[in-house]
């Protein structure tokens, strides 16, 4: 460990669908898409800024994808790990996704 904490993002679930199968029945056993509309982050370096928004998570691959502001389509951002996830039926459905730091 390099002494740095992993990056953590919190954003609400706004829609999607997920089906969970019995382990071993199909691969991946969790399939679907989780939408996080109106979510977003800005990254800046070297005088340049990149804005990503409207996150989607594929729970089967744990890939977080996003739209790039000003472009069409979605790009993969990183693999994520569900650290905290509350049911969308609760008043505060705010999962926290922790992105592993690059090595």
Image (tube, rainbow, N blue to C red):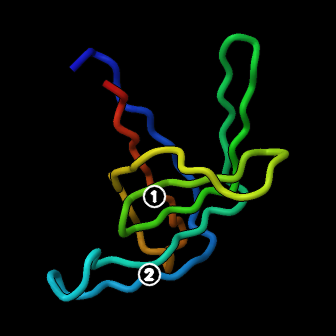
* Residue beneath disc 2: 18
Q: Is residue 65 left or right of residue 54?
A: left
In the figure, 52 relative to 57: above or below?
above
Residue that label 1 marks: 95
Look at the numbered disc 2 and give the secondary structure of its residue. strand
Q: SS at mark 1?
A: loop
> Does 27 sit left or right of 15 as displayed?
left
The residue positioned 36% from the left and 69% from the top of the image is 60
| Whole-percent x, y for residue 3 in the image | 27, 15
**Mark 2 burial class by Cα count in 10 Å: few <14, some 14-19, many 20+:** few
Estimate how packed mark 1 is, as few (under 14), some (14 to 19) or many (20 or more) residues with alpha carbons within 10 Å. Answer: some
Residue 36 at x, y percent in the picture? 62, 62
Identity of the residue drawn at 46% across and 78% down: 32
Residue 101, relative to residue 36: is it above or below? above
Which of the 4 image quadrants contains residue 18? bottom left
Q: In this view, does 68 lie to the left or right of 29?
A: right
Q: In which quarter of the image is the C terminus?
A: top left
The residue most toward the top is: 46
Q: Residue reaching furthest left?
A: 24
**Residue lying at 61% horizontally and 76% vertically, measured from the top left:** 15
Measured as percent of width and height from the top left, residue 65 is found at: 56, 54
Q: What mark, if any, has residue 40 been given in the picture? A: none
Camera-nearest residue between 11 and 26: 26
Give the distance between the C-alpha atoms of the residues marked 1 and 2, in whole angstroms. Answer: 15 Å
> Which numbered disc, 1 or 2, marks the residue closer to the eye?
2
Q: Which badge, 1 or 2, is on the more N-terminal residue?
A: 2
Q: Residue at horizontal 65%, vertical 28%? A: 43
Q: Nearer the viewer, residue 22 or 10?
A: 22
Is 44 situated above or below 27?
above
């Amino acid at each position: 460990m390099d002494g740095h904490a992993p990056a953590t993002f919190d954003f609400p679930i706004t829609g999607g669908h997920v089906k969970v199968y019995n382990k071993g029945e199909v691969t991946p056993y969790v399939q679907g898409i989780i939408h996080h509309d109106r979510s977003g982050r800005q990254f800046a370096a070297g005088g340049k800024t990149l804005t990503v928004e409207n996150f989607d998570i594929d729970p089967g691959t744990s890939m977080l994808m996003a739209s790039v502001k000003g472009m069409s389509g979605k790009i993969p951002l990183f693999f994520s790990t569900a650290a905290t996830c509350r049911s969308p039926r609760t008043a505060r459905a705010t999962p926290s996704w922790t992105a592993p730091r690059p090595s």
